Amino acid sequence: MVENRPTRTLVTGCCGFIASHLSIGLGQLGHEVVGIDWMKGSEGRKKESLEILENMENFRFIKGDVAESLPMEEFDFVVHLAALPGVRASIEKPFETFRCNAGVTAKVLDWAKEGYTNNLIYASSSSVYGLNQQIPFSEEDSLNSPNSPYAASKIATEVVADTYCRLFPIKAVGLRFFTVYGPRGREDMAIHKFLTWVSNKTPVTVFGDGSSSRDYTFVEDIVSGIIASMNYASKSMQPHSHEVFNLGNNSPIKLSDLIDLVGEIVGEEPIIDRQPDQLGDVPTTFANIDKAVKLLRYQPKTNLSLGLRKTWESMN
């Protein structure tokens, strides 16, 4: 339990993939959770998550745009997970991506500095590392090669948070999530698509030669890392401080091997539809999690095979 006592936590984007799992987890630990979501995008999945959340006694829902719906109430923590996700979507709508990601984070920090909370946990992304040649990616690496508006918007989000923390007595933790997957994941996420395509004997669209790799991280491990960062912020950080952590699995897998593993789990031979590389793609993501292990005691427990099986079971 965070701080070994019940707390009040505001979760933005509460019906989204990671945020819904976090909200449920906090509720099960006895914490009061207030969630905000505008319920746009993946409406069916979000409605499913909201039904689960509204069955919790200690949950209250606010429907609306985060920038316009922040409650004038004090909270022990704010976990800001609302965002416009996706590399491909950001190439189509770069301005909207910056507005929703960096802009709304600034709005949350504006609200926080008025005294409504001094503990902010927010979502960054492995995308900030872009075309980084240092493998695995460490928090100290330079962020000078973003390869999409989404990546740039997350770098901007970190800069915004760091600036506010210098000026105001806020404690902020940015979490660089590495390719999160699991039950109730978005339909446009690679693992969800691969499981669906292979099971339906639909050709699997593969961009490039299949050698690109990703550090897939199961959502339950990410939730554990978020809760650990809440503990760290409240117990170990001082006002005017900002930290970033990688939350990954520290175990990347090549795309071709991932698809083969999906085929084993589903029990079908994948049919490959090979296409040219996509704009905005990066060759690899690989999290160095030493800092999170040391300071957060973060330790991912779900290997990819087990996580895929859990995800597949949830889809049936």
Image (cartoon, rainbow, N blue to C red):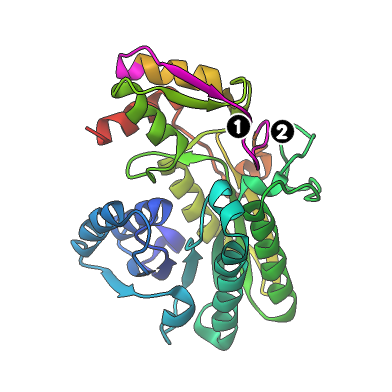
Along the line of sight, which residue is nearer the eye, 274 or 42?
Answer: 274
Q: Is residue 60 above or below residue 315?
A: below
Q: Main secondary structure of the magenta part?
A: loop
Residue 85 lies in the magenta stretch: no
Residue for point 34% across, 68% down: 33
The amino acid at mark 1 is Asn
Percent of width and height locating residue 200: 28, 24
Occupied quadrant, residue 114 = bottom right
Occupied quadrant, residue 16 = bottom left
Say which mark, if any, is on residue 250: 1
Percent of width and height locating residue 234: 55, 66
Question: Is 284 on the left-hand or right-hand side of 233?
Answer: right
Residue 118 visible in the shown view: no
Residue for point 73% across, 47% down: 139
Image quadrant holding the C terminus, namely top left
Q: How many marks?
A: 2
Residue for point 59% across, 69% down: 99
Image quadrant holding the N terminus, namely bottom left
Percent of width and height locating residue 174: 62, 58
Label 1 Cα crowd, 10 Å radius (few <14 / some 14-19 / many 20+): many
Occupied quadrant, residue 52 = bottom left
Q: Is residue 74 above or below residue 244?
A: below
Q: Earlier in the sequence, mark 2 or mark 1?
A: 2
Residue for point 48% across, 64% down: 79
Mark 2 secondary-structure assignment: loop
Q: Which residue is mark 2?
A: 136
Magenta region: 265-284
Q: Are marks 2 and 1 in contact (CB under 8 Å)?
A: yes
Percent of width and height locating residue 147: 71, 46
Residue 172 visible in the shown view: yes
Q: Residue furthest top?
A: 269
Q: Residue furthest left?
A: 55
